[in-house]
Amino acid sequence: MGETVDICCLKRISDGTKKYKIIELEHSNEVTIGRDRDVSVFIPSPAISRRHAVLLRQSDNTWTVTDNKSTNGVKVNGVKLAPLQPVTLRDGDHVQLGVPPAPCQAAPYVWVFCEKLRVKRKTFVRAEMAGDRKRPLADSQQTASQPDVAIAIPVRKKLCASVTSEWSPSQDLHRKLEQEEERMREQMRRQEEKLEELRQQLEEKDLVQVAMETEIRAKEEELREELRKEKERLEAERRDFEVEVKRAYEAEIETKERSLLERLGREQEQLRSEKENVEETLQREMERQLHEKDHRLQVELEQQKTQLENVIAQRELEQKMLASELTKTQCENEVQRDAALQARESLLANFATLMETELQCSICNELFVQVRYRCVVLEGLPPNVGPCEQWFMITDHRGLRVAENVHNSHSFCAACIEQWKKVKKQCPVCRCPISSQLRSLVLDSYIDRMVEHLSDDMKKSRQKLIEERKAEKLAKEAAAATAATSRGRGRRRGRGQGRQRGRPARGRGGTAAVLPPVHQEPPPVVVPAQPIVIESDASDTDVSEEQYHGYSSSEADSEESVEGVPGTYFGGWGHCFHCGT
């Protein structure tokens, strides 16, 4: 009696065989497929690995398939799965294990996943499957190949199921059930006796197999000994045969060698006679060819000699013409070289004269060494005035302002102007008061570059002058440093306080010139934003109008009024309160 049920399974579609037709997934949460004996579905095929694939039931009652690092892999709908990466199966998915045996053939192990496949089965099959859920399919196949020992168990279960479903209090059924149980026990006893008989046969078979294995091992030992003796005999025969073959070969070689030596002697004699004949023939032919070649070469030599004489005569004529042209060209080159040398000497002489005229220090009458510009910088200038046209405003005793234009960019050597300032604080050229000085790097670089093109005597003279100036400067700095260390701290403070106290009375007594140290570079001149008014009177004798404008004035000086940064020196004769020079 059968029934129709829906099961979740893998249905094979690869070929027409009924083996592994349906792999049920309904009664287990994990199904393993491979050719190992411990898997759920045993497939003894070389294309299948020991544990090829694993199918797992998830919590939502879905199934996943995982490739368990198999050799030939697992494909779902033609897509190969990554090892140990589960993929969820859907209804109708094709699962392929392994690869086709040949490129033109289909894969042998292909199933389709069915969530609900309607099948018809007998009632006892479900009971049997309920008892065998955890038993591998391989054990079922092995049991099916042996005699049906446990056939009474499914029959009894069938009867119990029928009695349970169709139970009645009738005694008839109870008697039938007891009779059926007695019959089943008898049948089970007979099956057990049969199983015991089969076990005894199997033990006898094992004993026979052990005896046969012992006999086979003894036979193998005997055959191995016979094989060893046979090998020794064959080895002795091989050695004897090799000795005989060697003797025969040596005799044959000796015979062949004697015959070859005789043949070689005959051929050598024949070749010797042929060689003599050929040498005589070649000697006569070579003598004839040499005679003809000598005659031909002599004729060619005469022709080449004539041609060479003509060529030599032509070359001598050309050489004479070239020599005359070369002499003429050399004369012209010498004339041009002399003219160029004269022009260069005259240019250098004019250039040296020009440098001595324009770039000489008016104090030492030498080329400038560390050029210094003498600048008279007075505050109160318009912002658009250049460095060579300094404007300043002077208010006289009558209250009138006079605008003066002073051109004051005279240049001197640094050492010369410092030496000059020890005697006078005025410009050696225009006699204007010296208020500041700047170094001209452009003139220094220009003079150094131009001196390189002068004569050696002028270069040596220039170098000697520079070294002397450097030595003098070092000596002065050393003396100044010695004097500075010898003075005490108290004297410097007292002298500064005295200058501070005597400053307010300087308006009528005159202004003292405070010059920067020689070894310091003055900062750039800064023009103030507001004009500075200097009130003067006839009593101001420090700076007279005659020194600035060329006329004298006897009017007394008035008090000075300066607008600027408080606490700084006046920018006329002392330090500028804007630039510090």
Image (cartoon, grey):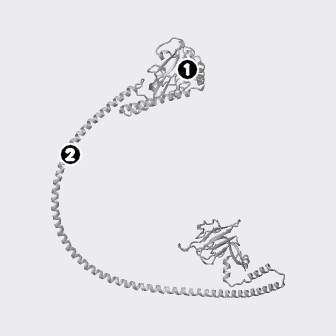
In the rendering, which numbered label is found on residue 427?
A: none
Can you give x and y, in whole percent of width and height, for residue 59 in the image?
Answer: 71, 65
Can you give x and y, in whole percent of width and height, for residue 197 in the image?
Answer: 70, 88
Q: Distance between the residues labelled 2 and 1?
A: 89 Å
Asked if one can make out residue 414 in the rendered structure from this viewpoint, the answer is no
| Residue for badge 2 | 319
User: To which quarter of the image does residue 500 belong?
Assistant: top right
- Point out the image quarter for the N terminus: bottom right
Dot 2 surroundings within 10 Å: few (below 14), some, or many (20 or more)? few
Q: Earlier in the sequence, mark 2 or mark 1?
A: 2
Can you give x and y, in whole percent of width and height, for residue 521 in the image?
Answer: 51, 29
- Identify the residue shown where x is 17% and y is 63%: 293
Q: Is residue 25 left or right of residue 474?
A: right
Q: In this view, does 274 lie to the left or right of 340?
A: left
User: To which quarter of the image does residue 34 belong?
Assistant: bottom right
Q: What residue type is labelled 1?
A: Ile
Q: Do the residues labelled 2 and 1 touch (CB within 8 Å)?
A: no
Q: At numbered mark 1, what does the secondary structure look like: helix, strand or loop?
A: loop
- Identify the residue shown where x is 30% and y is 80%: 260
| Residue for badge 1 | 532
Can you give x and y, in whole percent of width and height, for residue 493 in the image?
Answer: 60, 24
User: To which quarter of the image does residue 58 belong?
Assistant: bottom right
Q: What residue type is labelled 2?
A: Gln
Which is nearer the eye, 289 or 563?
563
